[in-house]
Every structure is written in C-alpha cells, then in structure tokens.
Amino acid sequence: MAPPESPQPYPAMTTVPRYLTGKKEEIKEFLDKFDVSLTSPTRSNGMHFVRLILVKRLIVSIRTSDIGVLWSGDHLFPGTVETLEMLRSNGKQVVFVTNNSTKSRADYKKKLEKLGIPSTTEEIFSSSYSASIYISRILKLPENKRKVFVIGETGIEQELQTENVPFIGGTDPAYRREVRPEDYKLIAAGDTSLLDPEVGVVLVGLDFHLNYLKLALAYHYIKRGAVFLATNIDSTLPNSGTLFPGAGSMSAPLIMMLGEEPVSLGKPNQAMMDAIEGKFKFDRSRTCMVGDRANTDIRFGLEGKLGGTLGVLTGVSSKEDFLTGPIRPSVYLDKLSDLLEAK
C-alpha cells in the first residue's frame, strides 16, 4: 500500500454554510440525511454526524486542550450528555475521534466517564492509535527495522504497546538531557550507543519535553532510511484562552532540515478516515463530520467525501472562519446541544 499523501492547500470554497441554531425543522431535515455521525468533543474539537434519525454511528472528534465541542477544560458544556443520549436513543453508535496523541484511548475513556459520558475503548479513535495501526498492520518493515523512535508522550507509547510495536525515546528520561560535545561525533559515526540500528520509523507527536537531542537523533534516523511519520500536523494547541505549539510544531524543524513532509496519521489526512471506515464499516455518503476547527475537522469530512459537515462555534474556528474562510462546513451551530431542538 502506498503511503498516504500529505494534505495539499484546499481550494477556496464559495458556498455559504447554513446557520441552523433555533431552526428546529431545518435541524431535523439535516440530521435525517445521515446514518453516521463523527464528533469532536474536547478542546477545539469538532463533531462528525451522519444521518441522525437513521444514524448507526456517531464519530466525535475530541481533544484534551482547553475548548471544544463537548467540554472546556474539565467543564462539560450544558446539554452535551443529553445530546449524545438523544443520538444514541435513535440507534446511533458514537465514535470519538481525536488528533491529540498525548493520551491513549484508555485515558480518553477515563476522561469521558469522569465527565459523565459513557463510552468504551472501542468507541475512541485517536491519532496515536491510528499511527500504531499504520505501523503494525500497513507498513512493511524489514525484520531488523521494526523499532520506532518516538517524539511524544505516553499516549503514543501505550498505543504502540497495544500493537506490540517496540519503541525507544518518548518519555524515557535518558532522552531528556542536553547534548554533550561528544554526542556530535557519536551520532555522525552512527554509534549504536546513540543510534539504535533497529529503528525503522520516526513517529512525531506532541512532546512537552522536546529538545535538541531528540531532534538530532530523529533527523539522523530518517537520513539513514527510517520512515518519517506524524500523529498529526496541527500547528497549534489551544489552552487557557490562547494558543501554544501543537504537534505540527514538533515536526516543523525536521521538515525544514529534511525538505520533506511526514506522513500524517491524524485529521485531515485521509489515512485516518480510511482506518476509521475500515474499522466501523460506514457509508460515507450517509455520514457527517462535526467539528470546531475548519482546517482539520471540516476539511477531514470534505476530503473524505462525507455526506455532510457540521461546524460548531465552541472551539477554534469563528463564525467568520466558517462563513468566509477557504474551508467551510455545510451547516453550523452555536453549540452541539442546539441539536436537541430537533427532539
């Protein structure tokens, strides 16, 4: 299987999305078009919907940062549980999708349940899980090159472990140090004390302890033939009402050094959509993507040729973004719970 291509600039759209808040009949009409819903509940998350009256699956995009579709920090938006219950009572299966790689599916399950949202691990699809599946089941690595060098947090490590993929780096304290003068010569010589000859993949996600040593090792692994992967290419991470470096900012120095992009396994890359479809077997024409971030959530649905896209204004993208930006949902709401008006 050929590696998925990195997303290219999206052609500007000219259609104007419909505003549905307060319009009961239009909400019902919209929901009746789909059988599957994809939703993002956390931080700047988005939600993906497919036909709600006949919907069989609901995919929700979630994040751990500040604001999103379902919650802000540890505060659940009013009406979130009732909205999800309404969807489930109509026979919809809920699937939570997230680009955040710092937590595993098990971590997200705990987060959701803490907020009062019943869920199972199987209903959660993260970029770290997507990357682990890609490495273990799609990449055809030589027997002696199956180890992964990780730039990232424990969420990646946990998902690699579930797929029995060996790894180094990550949260290992041995990599959280300054570069020593002797390191340069050792790395240049390919010394096995610093460069593991069994590494065949470099996987980059959000890393709160990124440093020069990790970047230097990642660069030389890739130059020696390792596959360059990223959990996602989100440039920023919303938190506390402002923006911080996202996972894409971790890959940026390597992209500059190498002159090449990583294969991204998160939204909006279609490798993630293919993996979700492969697992849940839904009809794309009857599926709707719901999210709060136009350049990831909404683009994910548009490029995946889903039947619809729904934007919510509780996350990253503003009303102006949805109305005049280059990437626009087919409809948008003030908040997810506005769907309750269709009851």
Image (spheres, rainbow, N blue to C red):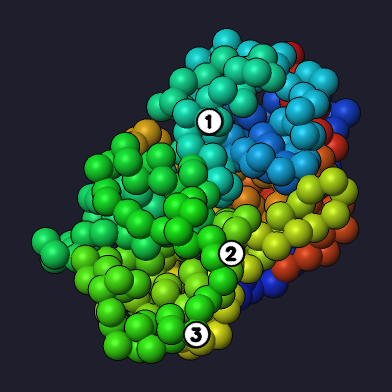
Q: Nearer the viewer, residue 95 or 137?
A: 137
Dividing the picture into quadrants, the one containing residue 234 is bottom right
Residue 135, given in percent of the width and then of the height, sits at: 29, 55
- The residue that mark 2 highlights is 210
Closest to the camera, between mark 2 and mark 1, is 2
Sequence order check: which comes first, mark 3 or mark 2? 3
For the residues bearing labels 1 and 3, Cβ distance under 8 angstroms: no
- The residue that mark 3 highlights is 181
What is the CA distance from the residue labelled 1 to the residue labelled 3? 39 Å
Sequence order check: which comes first, mark 1 or mark 3? 1
Q: Residue at x 53, y 25 (%)?
A: 109
What is the CA distance from the residue labelled 2 to the residue labelled 1? 22 Å
Q: Secondary structure at mark 1?
A: helix
Tell me if 195 is positioned left or right of 91 in this view: left
- The amino acid sitting under disc 1 is Asp
| Above or below: residue 29 compared with residue 331 | above
Mark 1 closeness class: few <14, some 14–19, many ≥20 residues within 10 Å: few
